[in-house]
Image (spheres, helix red, strand yellow):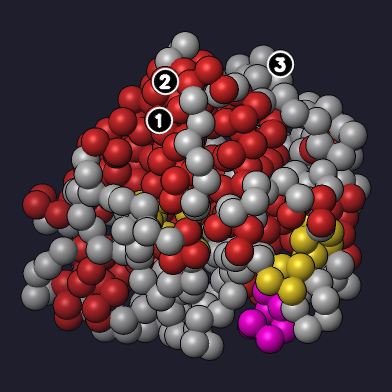
Amino acid sequence: MKNVRIYMLSFCFIAMALTACDEQLDVQPQQSIDESTALSTERNVLAALVGAYDGLGENDVMGGGQHLTELFADDGDQIWAGTFEEPEQIFQKRILVQNLDVERFWIESYEAINRANNVLSALDVVNTDLRGQVEGEAKFIRALVYFDLINLCGKTWIDGDPSANPGVPLVLTPTRSIDASSEVPRNTVAEIYAQVISDLTDAKNLLPENNGIFATTYAASGFLSRVYLMQERFTEAQEEVDRVIRSNAFSLTPNFADAFNQGGNTTEDIFTIEVTTQDGLNDFILFYAGEARGGRGDIDITQTHLDQYEAGDARLDLFYIDVNGIPRTGKWQDNANQDGNINIIRLAELYLTRAETRFRAGDTAGAAEDLNVIRTRVGLPAVQADAVSLESILQERKLELMFEGHMFRDKKRNRISIGGLGFNADELLYPIPQREMDVNLALIQNPGY
């Protein structure tokens, strides 16, 4: 892996990230910091933390690269119409081990992890009043990246034995040079999940309730609910959701459309990737939006998908027809020639998670209550408790969260086939990139590749 690279976004970015002391505001913008000095002072560790956030926001990590998982999960809702070969392979579930999108996802994910590990290795130079928060933010970043890696490169939790199934290499210390020790084998799926939960639990306990555009204790709880859903630990998932909802720190935007294409966080954003004119790229916009709205128009929405919305559903109103007569989602389009933030976790998701966990626990009235929060916002009539089913909850979840990067996880954890393939088909795993296999002889390839 490369030595840690630090990307400083602005003085105010640092100030918002790390709460407040004049010394922190003295950090000088620069493109990189030499390894010998990068972690020797508190100011440089804080700079490294911003670099870790920047790594998380890389377009092949969480900077919109999740559009590839939407293509991977597709079963008739959208079509890859672009000319790039790599997304076409993912859409068709015929991925080559040399696929450059998969390779970049792997490389940039481990670069983000390495940046977080660098921060964690230097906590002793951070003042004690700030040390816990810095630790929590770095662990939050590392957990998010590992969670995406394990969901795409390892078998899902419910497929076989997670304590035996190979996951991805678990690296918890900085990589600053490449030698024989860099050849790390794949840890098990269970070991990766255990680390993700440990990191997120620490982050939940260490992070503040308010932290500007950066990770908070509620963001950590929100992500824990996702992890527990994948493990079918529904009670724990609901506890984390309850914690966020009962905080009253967030509320749905009055209009569904207002949750998207914003230059700043909305009232329902629990965590976003910030995109500014100085830094960041929103790949959701690049591939979903038509050319007149800032994108390439490479992903077409099908009539099959549009037909799933009820009459009067405001979510349907957000779709538009581009100049070529192709339906497109309005969730992702430029806003005054500037890409909007990337919604990573928003309150609507948590209401839908709780609807599901309540239903699975036999609380159909509670499930209907949560579903109706979502339905009322988009102008749909309320449903009664006796009309709620797991299928109706998952369909509501699909329509609310479509094109945001959730469908692959939701289908696999619910054992739903994708494109005629069983949820546990070999074709529904990313390969370990051939580049990694060539340089790390300790790795084993996924089945089918």
CA gap, disc 1 to disc 2? 6 Å
For the point 37% across and 58% down, which residue is it?
253
Mark 1 Cα shell of 10 Å, populated few (<14), some (14-19), many (≥20): some
Could you say where residue 331 lies in the image, as x and y percent from the top left? 58, 65
| CB under 8 Å between discs 3 and 2 | no
Q: Looking at the rendering, in which quadrant would you find the N terminus?
A: bottom right
CA gap, disc 3 to disc 2? 34 Å
Give the mark nearest the N terminus, 1 or 3.
3
CA gap, disc 1 to disc 3? 35 Å
Query: What residue does disc 3 label?
Result: 160
410 in the magenta segment: no
Query: What residue does disc 1 label?
Result: 369
Camera-side residue of 192 and 256 = 256
Query: What residue does disc 2 label?
Result: 365
Image height check: is 332 above or below 29? above
Image height check: is 109 above or below 234? below
| Residue 220 figure quarter | top left
Q: Which secondary structure lies at badge 1?
A: helix
* Count of all numbered marks drawn on residues in the image: 3
| Residue 403 figure quarter | bottom right
Disc 2 marks a residue whose amino acid type is Ala
Could you say where residue 101 lies in the image, as x and y percent from the top left? 75, 61
Can residue 100 be seen here? Answer: no
Mark 3 Cα shell of 10 Å, populated few (<14), some (14-19), many (≥20): few
Q: Looking at the rendering, in which quadrant would you find the C terminus?
A: top right
Magenta residues span: 288-296
